[in-house]
Image: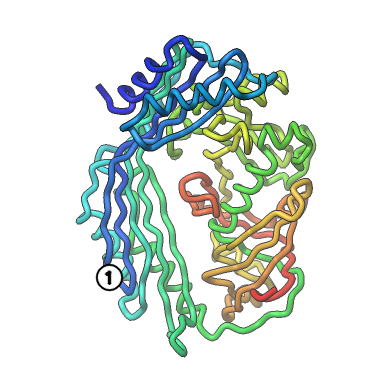
Amino acid sequence: MNRTIEIAGRVLDHVGERAEAEVLVTGGESALTRFANSFIHQNVADEGYEVSLRVAVDGRVNAAGTTSLERLEDFVDDTIGIATLQRVDENWPGVAEPTDVVDPHHFDEATAAATPAERARLVADFVAAAPELVAAGYCATMGHDVAFVNTDGHRAFGRYTRATIDGIHQAGEALGSVAAAGSGHATSQRLGDLDGAAVGALAADRARRGLDAFDLEPGEYQVVLAPECVATIAMFLSYYGFNGKHYAEGQSFVELGKKQFDAAIHLFDDAADPRALGVGFDAEGTPRRRVELIKSGVTQGIAHDRRTARKAGVSPTGHGDPGSEVWGPLPSHVFLEEGATSVDEMIASVDRGLYVVTFNYCRVLDPKQLDVTGLTRNGTFMIENGKITGAVTNLRFTQSFVTALGQGRVQAIGNDARFADSEFGPGMMHVPSLHLEKWNFTGGAAG
């Protein structure tokens, strides 16, 4: 029997008839090869399992999680015991009835069984892309199984894999510090899809171009944003806007049916997309279904778990996760439809502006407007007369992400869509580069 299914069954058996219950077990092997100073210095692998349990005793609800399998019975007893001490939850939707769940087959056997030598070859290609520079980063692989059971007889099972190469090249050490660094990233279901040499070459090019950076006066500039920046925008839109809990509480910018964005923007969440990572159901056993978030600039959809769907009088969309009763259902298989313009063509169309590689340390100032402040990192470059003319020191920005993507603001959408690393982690946002009309930079990295 599969290990996750066995663990889930063991937990449910111990719940017995004492409570309504839903159990999610996720686990398998994860492996990491880390490198610094252009040498591999760490290779680790582990097999682990995470158990999430939610119970309801006469409408009194409690949720808990554990990674320890040695005292599962005590874990179940404690979770039920604490539930009996809670107030009745009037919004408890009950557990899901049995329903068919389709596995999207986002699993690659070769990636799940990847060896340290295979990850090391990818690292070697990254480093060899610029042997005169200093490289650091990691290559990770994972193969996880996910099992769900509940007391109403609903069962679901799925498997997925993920592989990532992520790193920087550093150039021009001065006074013991790094004068410039450039980053590169790639994530896929399959390790065989990743090109360490290409990712390393991109990071090296950004590092070399980043030397001799100069300070730039704050102000509004046209920008070409690399996928990592766009992934952060998409993640913040998803969490703060298309989140059923935030929407119900009046904290979201979303106005359904209104053209809030440029007509070129098409954003959707689809766990069944062939490129996606993960399984076809959520932590409540609900099949994940495609949600059109923005289509032709019109805001169209919201992500719901069973709780927010019940309050809204709609069907759940399969976006319940452990803890979503606290922070809300999050779209996490998000795709921004790519365009037909290359990054070089975007840059060539800019008279004066900036090419930005990565955003860092972004924080929301006003969720209703999605005003965000953050920094640029690992590559900020001046564009003049259609060419990159030099590097700029890191800048602070304060910008409404909704306004930045507003009507008439999107000049071009790139043809380079891929999984990009946002501040919430890799493998969640599949996005291209963007050329935007305006971005508000308010100062240097110091403020």
| Count of number-bearing discs | 1
Q: Which residue is rendered at x = 46% and y = 90% of the image?
A: 175
Q: Which residue is rendered at x = 50% and y = 78% of the image?
A: 209
Q: Is the image coloured rainbow, by chain, by secondary structure, or in one colour?
A: rainbow
The residue that label 1 is drawn on is 39
Q: Nearer the viewer, residue 28 or 77?
A: 77
Q: Nearer the viewer, residue 22 or 342?
A: 22
Q: Residue 34, image x and y in percent?
A: 32, 61
In the rendered view, tell whether residue 419 sits above or below residue 92.
Answer: below
Q: Residue 283, image x and y in percent?
A: 49, 28
> Residue lying furthest bottom in this view?
175
Q: Quadrant of residue 92?
A: top right
Q: Residues within 10 Å of mark 1 (few under 14, many from 20)?
A: some
Secondary structure of the residue carrying tag 1 is strand
Q: Residue 29, image x and y in percent?
A: 29, 41
In the rendered view, tell whether residue 405 sits above or below residue 287.
Answer: below
Q: Quadrant of residue 148?
A: top left
Amino acid identity at mark 1: Phe
Q: Which residue is rendered at x = 25% and y = 21% of the image?
A: 1
On-image quarter of the C terminus:
bottom right
Q: Which residue is rendered at x = 46% and y = 80% of the image?
A: 178
**374 with respect to 341 (left or right):** right
